[in-house]
Amino acid sequence: MSEIKETSQHLKSLKIFQPSIILDSNKVLSNIEQMASKARKSGVVFRPHFKTHQSAEIGSWFRDFGVEKITVSSLDMALYFAENDWNNITVAFPVNILEIEKINMMAGDLQLNLMLDSVAVATALEKQLKYPVGVWIKIDVGYGRAGIAWNKKPAIRELYQKICRSHLLEFEGILTHSGHVYQAKSTSEIRDIYGTTVQRLDKIKTSLRSAECQISIGDTPSCALVDDFSGLDEIRPGNFVFFDLMQENLGVCSAENIAVAVACPIVAKYADRRELVIFGGGIHFSKESLIDEKGEKIFGYLTWLENGRLGPILKNASVVALSQEHGIIRVDDEMFDQLSIANMVLIYPVHSCLTANLYDEYMTIQGNKISRL
Amino acid sequence: MSEIKETSQHLKSLKIFQPSIILDSNKVLSNIEQMASKARKSGVVFRPHFKTHQSAEIGSWFRDFGVEKITVSSLDMALYFAENDWNNITVAFPVNILEIEKINMMAGDLQLNLMLDSVAVATALEKQLKYPVGVWIKIDVGYGRAGIAWNKKPAIRELYQKICRSHLLEFEGILTHSGHVYQAKSTSEIRDIYGTTVQRLDKIKTSLRSAECQISIGDTPSCALVDDFSGLDEIRPGNFVFFDLMQENLGVCSAENIAVAVACPIVAKYADRRELVIFGGGIHFSKESLIDEKGEKIFGYLTWLENGRLGPILKNASVVALSQEHGIIRVDDEMFDQLSIANMVLIYPVHSCLTANLYDEYMTIQGNKISRL
């Protein structure tokens, strides 16, 4: 029997008949193990970003690898993990002063670290804080999203001094997210961006003349590619826990690393266009896409189960369109003959963070449900 | 005081401090009224698609305009509205035979209509059905997603005859969704597509020699532009209930029609690049984008409240990037001076169906919560 049929039968035996996110827990564990081991060898703190999985249970798996400190991207996410016994949490998102109540709910009970990039917000925060918090200065090393631009030394110094004068803001260090690596055309370009990032942060640290200033970076492409984190104190990758087609396309992971796929039923088959329609659309994948080797926009590739794990990336079966609930899979002749209406198929997503966010729970390949925020 | 400040204060008075979807219920009512009135004048059944709002309460507003029949795009959505007293429901999505239990749960209690485009699925359905259902033959008039291609008369006839021979499948008519209107470059192109659609469906009806064959179409652009639905029996638009920037960009609605916006806090401000960062990302908007007049990709435009309603589309303040929780707003000088950190701003989404799907509830401008599926 073909892998397609075996996969379909297995999913049906788990009573999966509509779009669901399937988790390969062995791959997750191996992804965590690899990153934790690299961090340990370099002697840096491994503070994984939990925004990708947003699950207390998956979070707990990190503890076996020595992880005690985590990163999140919203105060609600911080509250969720705080309730699940994490007591050292960095919120790697500009402080939203309107949510000060949540900050004060946590700041007295745990080591809460916040991210600042302006004196204005530092002042507002200090005024409304009831307990001390750790603070990181966010530096923009070239991405152009949040942070003080790396070459604005006076602005960085001014914020640093503001923090030093405060009794409630405890300076932790400087932090960045080099999101521009996602635009890189090659792995050597990612390595270059990483090198420039470390260099720029190091210069800022020197200019601050602060011995206790830590340096923290946090993007999966750099953290996955680089083996030696010399010059850093902390890494905060997040996506690596699942990886996805975007990371594979960047060359920073392979099919062996991608740990989530969306299970979808095939509901229609069109021989003349070599296309199939699945129940599985933008509300099940998100609309993130990438450009394949032929220059076509794709939203996912088929995979199947192989030895109980999520298998190869089947580039001859790509999701070429998504509307709200419909997805269109385009296949070659060989694949077309293997696929039938009422098969359940597995599809690797382009961006696992946004895809996972669309579900209330994961289902492991073994059929265990894992809840998320 | 400026509209920006008044809007911000109003949202804060409703205790909105993080991304939330705001509903202008007056606009919704007026959108429903306009479409219902056009359908009535043309003497066609108005069977609105409820996939856009997915809310029992908003659904109930349609009853005042004489609506008794609805469209949904999944069996779970059908179950939800069935529980909320709708007893004539068309599921405008290819039958997912794996969910036959849900079909049988409803088929005995209400007028359930399903959509078929192959003899294979019709056979499987007939075999597993416990009660009769209405069936529509889905025709692909040129979109290339689901349905039998309009020019494949023998395949259409074969399915029609299969349905006629069945005691459980009750033929309703032929149905299409001309999704290719979303690629149109002008409103006259949309009108042309509509004209061709009606013509092709009419030819099919004639060739089937079936007096009782109804013709049903269902896309918001055509239904919003066309005033006279001669030749049709039923219209099934969905998005028109909220409209959005995509529809405005197509020229089928104006700012006065767009009935939802996402409220987001401004968390950072960067004078040198005339950009602001909001708490509001891909998980709050979806990643649907459109190309503006300058050829740039945008994910939303700012608006404000004007006389208690969602106001103009502010094209000098556009969302130019979205990551998971971050959004970047690019503004002109005048707008930059008006916007401050800790303001709550309102942003019109590109695709309201996908945006609304990311929330558990709506908040009206008056502060009432409206739940959804």
Image: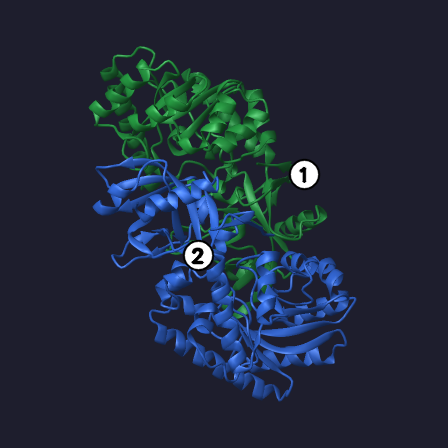
Chain colours: A green, B blue
Q: Residues within 10 Å of mark 1 (few under 14, many from 20)?
A: some
Q: Secondary structure at mark 2?
A: loop
Inspect this view and state whether residue A103 appears: yes
Q: Position of residue A208 (x, y in %)?
A: 25, 16
Tell me the kind of residue under disc 1. Answer: Gln
Q: Chain of mark 1?
A: A
Q: Tag 2: residue type?
A: His
Q: Is residue B142 left or right of residue A213?
A: right
Identified at 25% across, 23% down, the residue is A156
Rendering coords of residue B151 (x, y %): 51, 80
As drawn, the residue found furthest toward the right would be B130
Do the numbered discs 1 and 2 sit on residues whose CB atoms are within 8 Å? no
- Is residue B35 rendered to the left or right of residue B174? left
**Residue that protrudes farthest toward the top in the picture:** A211
Task: Choose between B323 and B274: the one closer to the eye.
Answer: B274
**In this view of the protein, which residue sits in the foreground, A114 or A363?**
A114
At 38% from the left and 26% from the top, the residue drawn is: A115
Q: Disc 2 is attached to a residue of which chain?
A: B
Res. A366 mark: 1
Q: Which residue is mark 2?
A: B351
Q: Is residue A320 visible?
A: no
Q: Position of residue B271 (x, y in %)?
A: 23, 37
Image quarter hosting the N terminus of chain B: top left
Above or below residue A296? Residue B158 is below
Q: Mark 1: which secondary structure?
A: loop
- Where is residue A360? Give x, y as percent: 60, 42
Q: Is residue B97 above or below residue A364?
A: below
Of residues B191 and B68, the one nearer the viewer is B68
Q: Is residue B204 above or below residue B354?
A: below
Closer to the camera: disc 1 or disc 2?
Answer: 2
User: How packed is label 2: few (under 14 Cα within 10 Å), some, or many (20 or more)?
Assistant: many
Mark 1–mark 2 distance (CA, rounded to whole Å): 37 Å
